[in-house]
Amino acid sequence: MKPEDVLQIIADNRGTAICIPTMTTSPAWRTIAPDDLSVGCVGFMGGASTLGLGLALGAPSRRVIVFDGDGSLCMQLGSLPTIAGVAPRNFTHLLFRNNVYHTSGAQGTPGGEGLDWVMMAKGAGYRMTFAVRTLDEFKQRLPAILNGDGPVFAELHTGLSEKTPMTDRGGRAFHEQVETLRNRLQA
Amino acid sequence: MPLPESVPAPLIIDTFKDVFRAERAGHRRQDPLGWIISVPDTHQKTVLAALDKERDIRVLTCSTEDEANGVAAGLWMTSEPVIVMIQHAGLYASINTLRGIAMDGRVPIFYMIGLLSRERDKDLHESKHSMVRYAEPLLDVFGVPHARLEVPDDVKYIPQYYRLSRERRGPTAVLVGLATS
């Protein structure tokens, strides 16, 4: 699966969901969905999942979808039990798995292909966990991703994205995105 | 300067409630009154234990202080009142996230930071423990306004620095001198 194709499907179906891209999903997402219900996390690697957790707890009537990376989640692995412990029903954790730190030069992630992320999320206590390997499978799982009883964890086996935050540095400053989303949620 | 004293947990929790009530005023959502995002801290354990019995305040325990920053930021973006309780070692461990979220993201995060091993008869800068000695200099390097909670009257700094974090849109901290009682 190309990550850009997955993101396009989410953008077409997300409704009012808040989306939190990080690292390699950030450049594509701001092109596909240049809106005010997203906040891209770059500069504090691994932080997207708990930023999403806070949003999910504070805005329980909205779905919150985190676009995490496997390298990023390795950096904040403790977020799995933290999220599962609170268990927000409106929280979806998408793991874009490519087994490398793409942004920094595609160095292999610890554990590489041997890691079973679904088992880790399930063991942490996520309510729904599954892996997705094709776009057709992804489309079939879309109702669970968008409306399933969270926390939902989906491990998406993807190839490398076309752009990374290093090859495409554009986009609005993080603080501007934060302010815009906060204002939007207050409206 | 008076010798530091242990500050009672009920006094701190009542102060938290006042802070949260002030921020909740006029908001649609009133439940919970506010959020405490914590990574357990030996120094503030009496406060954490007492918070377990509080129905109005919701406590969320994180695995790391990095996570606590993220959760606090997400809650603030939804206008929820939130305080982060950590220990000094956690401040050191999470300083990049404080920089990335609270400073670069201009997210107001108010921290209560326990100074485990702070000696009663020494100023922080003279402590033999590096974790105690470097806490204020580290906050100064990052330009984080901070105050000390050394005697019961110092609880006034909690609302003061909480408000300051909102006004300046960034991090502020109160350092808990002796273990709370």
Image (spheres, coloured by chain):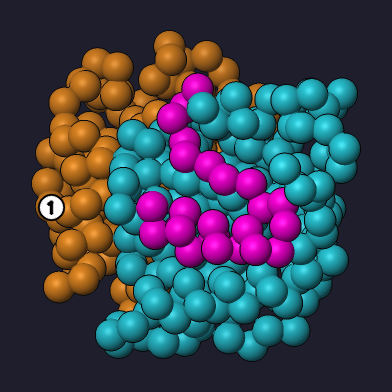
Chain colours: A orange, B cyan
Q: Number of marks in the image?
A: 1
Q: Which residue is mark 1?
A: A35
The region drawn magenta spans B141-164
Q: Is residue B112 above or below residue B31?
A: above
Left or right, residue B29 beside residue B32? left
Left or right, residue A7 beside residue B116? left
Three-letter residue code for mark 1: Asp
Q: Is residue B124 magenta?
A: no
Snapshot quadrant of residue A82: bottom right
Name the residue located 66 percent from the left edge and 31 percent from the top edge. Answer: B135
Snapshot quadrant of residue B9: bottom right
Q: Is residue A112 visible?
A: no
- Element marked by disc 1: loop
Left or right, residue B160 beside residue A162? right
Q: In this view of the protein, which residue sits in the foreground, B28 or A63?
A: B28
On the image, the x and y values in percent for residue A97 come to 48, 37
Quick one: quadrant of the C terminus of chain A?
Answer: bottom left
On the image, the x and y values in percent for residue B179 come to 83, 54
On the image, the x and y values in percent for residue A119 come to 69, 53
